[in-house]
Amino acid sequence: MFLASDNAGPAHPQVMQHVLAANDGYAMPYGADDIMDSVTHKLRDIFKAPEAAVYLVATGTAANALALGCYTQPWQTVFCSPVAHIHEDECNAPEFYASGAKLTLVPGADKMTPDALRRAIEQENTRGVHGPQRGPISITQVTERGSLYTLQDLRALTAVAKDFGLPVHLDGARFANAMVALDCSAAEMTWQAGVDVVSFGGTKNGCMGVEAVVFFDPEKAWEFELRRKRGAHLFSKHRYLSAQMQGYLEDDLWLACARQANTKAARLADGLKARGADFLHAPQANMIFASFPRAVHQRLHAAGAKYYIWEGALEGTDPEEMLAARLVCDWSISEQQLDLFLSHFQ
Amino acid sequence: MFLASDNAGPAHPQVMQHVLAANDGYAMPYGADDIMDSVTHKLRDIFKAPEAAVYLVATGTAANALALGCYTQPWQTVFCSPVAHIHEDECNAPEFYASGAKLTLVPGADKMTPDALRRAIEQENTRGVHGPQRGPISITQVTERGSLYTLQDLRALTAVAKDFGLPVHLDGARFANAMVALDCSAAEMTWQAGVDVVSFGGTKNGCMGVEAVVFFDPEKAWEFELRRKRGAHLFSKHRYLSAQMQGYLEDDLWLACARQANTKAARLADGLKARGADFLHAPQANMIFASFPRAVHQRLHAAGAKYYIWEGALEGTDPEEMLAARLVCDWSISEQQLDLFLSHFQ
Amino acid sequence: MFLASDNAGPAHPQVMQHVLAANDGYAMPYGADDIMDSVTHKLRDIFKAPEAAVYLVATGTAANALALGCYTQPWQTVFCSPVAHIHEDECNAPEFYASGAKLTLVPGADKMTPDALRRAIEQENTRGVHGPQRGPISITQVTERGSLYTLQDLRALTAVAKDFGLPVHLDGARFANAMVALDCSAAEMTWQAGVDVVSFGGTKNGCMGVEAVVFFDPEKAWEFELRRKRGAHLFSKHRYLSAQMQGYLEDDLWLACARQANTKAARLADGLKARGADFLHAPQANMIFASFPRAVHQRLHAAGAKYYIWEGALEGTDPEEMLAARLVCDWSISEQQLDLFLSHFQ
Amino acid sequence: MFLASDNAGPAHPQVMQHVLAANDGYAMPYGADDIMDSVTHKLRDIFKAPEAAVYLVATGTAANALALGCYTQPWQTVFCSPVAHIHEDECNAPEFYASGAKLTLVPGADKMTPDALRRAIEQENTRGVHGPQRGPISITQVTERGSLYTLQDLRALTAVAKDFGLPVHLDGARFANAMVALDCSAAEMTWQAGVDVVSFGGTKNGCMGVEAVVFFDPEKAWEFELRRKRGAHLFSKHRYLSAQMQGYLEDDLWLACARQANTKAARLADGLKARGADFLHAPQANMIFASFPRAVHQRLHAAGAKYYIWEGALEGTDPEEMLAARLVCDWSISEQQLDLFLSHFQ
């Protein structure tokens, strides 16, 4: 009953097969391997972006920090949600990679709204040379609370950014989960919606450790390569990153894995609802924030279930009685495990 | 006939088996996996350093830059060879990770000598607050020219460092190749010789992409963890780093691979010598810098041999006729390939 | 009628006399001038801190950023008010000088409360290596809204900091104005209240451009000297900084200037109140945020009065009719000018 | 007998008069003062560069580091002399302001030669993404050894830079001394010779602390303003910088001061030569490196003469007997002092 995160499950066998298959003889290092060529073409196809610049790194934080670094001057500020991964969970990596830039938190509990974003942008840059200058907008899709921006939401946010001439980054650590949930194309969710650069996650959805950074305008390509090397994120035996991504993309495995994760999460959410649990955020992809009695938590804990107790009780509930949980389904979780989990609600 | 680098060969099957074996069910993320526990203990045993702090990262540049970052203040300078990887091949990563520190190049063509090091240190820090302050010494073992520091060499260098109270880093991207060549223990080549922190390479010697950073004094442990996360080098699915290192260390595979590489290089060097080639540096581990006629280069090139033409002809030779090559043997190169290579000398 | 800021008035004649007197013959550079010795002793006396380390720089931003840099690791976050100068008006200088650290904004409109500070601190550092780590607290006294922390307020804030083992910085760009308003000693407002390092302003209160940084624990002294030089803030002809500070401190000129500024502001505030103006913040030192009719603004503008229109109308007022002004009195403003200003209210 | 540096003498009375005159009433802060307007126009006239962007800062290190920062990406390297101030005397400020870039030392004892510069540039950037990328060239005029680049020298160096598309910075801490010695115009020594940005020194030549940064192509103007503010080098009471520069430029005071300093140095050099001293570098402006007997040093020391003993004896001399001195004449040194100095040679 492992529901603590989707960063702790196994890699999908198909991904591993590609890694094994790649482990044969010599391959050109540093991204010049043939597999990377095929990955680049494949991702350009997926995104319907024949000019896109495509790079691989091993961690989501690297993808985010390097992508943002290409669009943020040290005297600028990045606009993001107060619960964004780049703010809360990257130990100042974005600030590091942007040589000391700032993050401006757009007020809100989870998703940024266009109005709040506009106000936040308007409030910066009113002080000439004295205040931080306006920099890129970073949007997390799926959000850290398991919510989705609809295509309309995305377009509304990027429209605000464009009003101010600001670039847009999409943190897609759970890109596939979002796409499956929205039933849209990769192009629709990115450049067609006004996104300039995307962190396209693989690690949480069936890979060992690989993320793509896709620039729709290739002008930043060489700068990214220099930043990646300087950040020590350029792999010599790069083929093992390429092979993971190749396996991940082949036959739409990435979508299949995401569909599995989302379906399982929906099943779990339904089960929880049927058993009286309430939700802090409406579950939309593979993450659930549910409130249920302490007694159930205790039984689950005793039975070895793994998940995070979530701070911040649901409004109107007694924290002595009710406690919230963050429950994340990865692609590999089984129905049996979910049923076992639910069984402890009696 | 791939002799361009030891960073382009395959991972050893034993390493891959451990990775595959690790790919089962859930594992705690971010280095809290059980395999990492065993790796930590194993490396402490190997180094006879029961208190050592042990961390894994995926690239050699990350190992070097993060290790040095822990010992270098932004206003200091790191002493190293002019041909050190940290100076020539890391696109300013050490400067980045040390928040803008400097590198001081100790004059010399390859290995640092104690005298040159002492002079370089003495020349810094004579200007009070105005000049850069003295920082750590970084030693590369095997050097970038395929040379070795003997244990005596190492102790003489670290003695200079200790005279000035400066810490010592060892860039051991080819640590195993050096150990095998010197026929010494890991402890003798590091802390017993005065080294404070070592980048212990795996990638070039049979792994996909993993390096250990070993601090003999664990006081830097927490700072390293923060720096690693901030540098975006902390893997969520860390088990795949751990498993590589586990497979690499099991049954002394790391030494066996290094022995293979060194033995093949010695065989190649003997063959080259017998065919009249001269050496820019005496080959001591798995790298060879040999000078031979252009005509041979042309035949090798036509036959598909891969290696770097090395700038800087051997003194006393006519650059129109003679050209130098850098030839690196990895663990996987076969005798047949070497014989084939040598056959082109006629 | 210049009320735009206290950073635009002249230097006091006594300060200039000291500068002129210092302009005689040779003086040791880089802070080794004799005048600096006397300044150090004088400031140690004023702060009743015989061990304090005392340095001069030319701008308030340099004082803040360098002082904070000594106490902030790059992976930490500085706690401050959302309206702090270090956040809003220094173009990311604190982030720059702290090698990419973050600022955490303690919710509130102006002064930090101990409760809000405690909650902000508690909310950081709950994510192990993933989130930013807790760093120093920076308190602005006088605040950017012209408010004062009482000694009790200060002690309550630093008590929270001490509970978490965090250092405390005081941004005292208007230090003298605060001291005069609180009628307390420099020691009471700093180290006796739990402050570790203070930016002691001179520029806004009668100098040309000089601020002292005073460390009550001298352990940071050498690091500060290196940071100041590396930041390009060490003056070769340092005597001209020393002389300003010497003139500023002599015969309590600094307190006299602050008293003048505060007294004038009080007079202005009384006059405004008598004429029906409302205050966005209760004026406590030399800054006033007052709301009055647009028509008055227009008359003042036509008469050449200089001040900032302040965004954010007073609650309950009609922004079409009423507009807020930020009015700052420096030491040199005359009663005539204030009376002239008030005369436009009819 | 103060010959230790030209950074320890007084400011010229004319400079002080302008500062005093500026100390009247209110002036717009942050460089918007009227005096700055006149300074900008005056410097544009002097440089025959009507489009130039002109800024003031208070220290030479700030001028250099900020100017270079505008032209150096973090992954690049700056080419300079091994004895350049930016390398030896700025405690890593250039690396700090360029977010961790590197400095490449062009081999040589003092002046860079076009050949050595070309070789140094050629040797960088041969490693693709792995090595540091080529950045700007920084030339010091007058050099740190008191030498001059002729206009031909300058044009030859910048021609090399232009061959590689690299920008050129001139560190002109002693700009006026060089101009006077070369008897050329400011335009000839800068943009007409291929220089893109110049640090135009005032501090060492009669000011309290002010340097101009002049960009001949104004495209970097706004970036410089942001970098200056972020570096904490933007003065609120900017008029005191402006006034110094105004006084310095009025009636060619800057050239008169430099002429005085150079003339005195020539007189001193002649006197030294007549008394048998030898020179480590041919004196060309206001700095002298002379070798003379220890006994004379002892007499001078006893008589209170201030200067630096220079490491590195003149070749062919016995260091037990002969010792070198660095002697710098500032604008204010009197003939009497020089005669007194020489009198100790007997």
Image: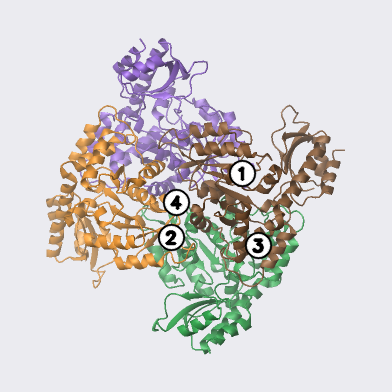
Chain colours: A green, B brown, C orange, D purple
Distance from disc 4 to disc 1, alpha carbons, whole Å, reads: 24 Å
Give the foreground label among 3 and 4. Answer: 3
Q: Give SS at disc 1.
A: helix
The answer to whether any part of residue B124 appears in the image is yes
The answer to whether B274 is drawn above or below residue C274 in the figure is above
Q: Amino acid at mark 1?
A: His
Chain under label 1?
B
Q: x, y (%) of residue C311?
A: 29, 63
Q: Amino acid at mark 4?
A: Ser
State the residue position of label 2: C133
Which of the labelled discs sits on residue B85, or is there none? 1
Q: x, y (%) of residue D29?
A: 29, 47
Give the foreground label among 4 and 2. Answer: 2
Q: Which of the 4 quarters of the picture holds residue C86?
A: bottom left
State the residue position of label 4: C99
Chain under label 3?
B
Identified at 56% across, 87% down, the residue is: A343
Circles 3 and 2 on the same subunit: no
Looking at the image, is mark 4 or mark 2 earlier in the sequence?
4
Q: Which of the 4 quarters of the picture holds residue D290?
A: top left
Circles 4 and 1 on the same subunit: no
Identified at 26% across, 37% down, the residue is: C37
Q: Nearer the viewer, residue B109 or D251?
A: B109
Q: Amino acid at mark 3?
A: Ala
Q: Give SS at disc 3.
A: helix
Give the foreground label among 3 and 1. Answer: 3
Distance from disc 4 to disc 2, alpha carbons, whole Å, reads: 14 Å
Looking at the image, is mark 3 or mark 1 earlier in the sequence?
1
Q: Amino acid at mark 2?
A: Gln
State the residue position of label 3: B243
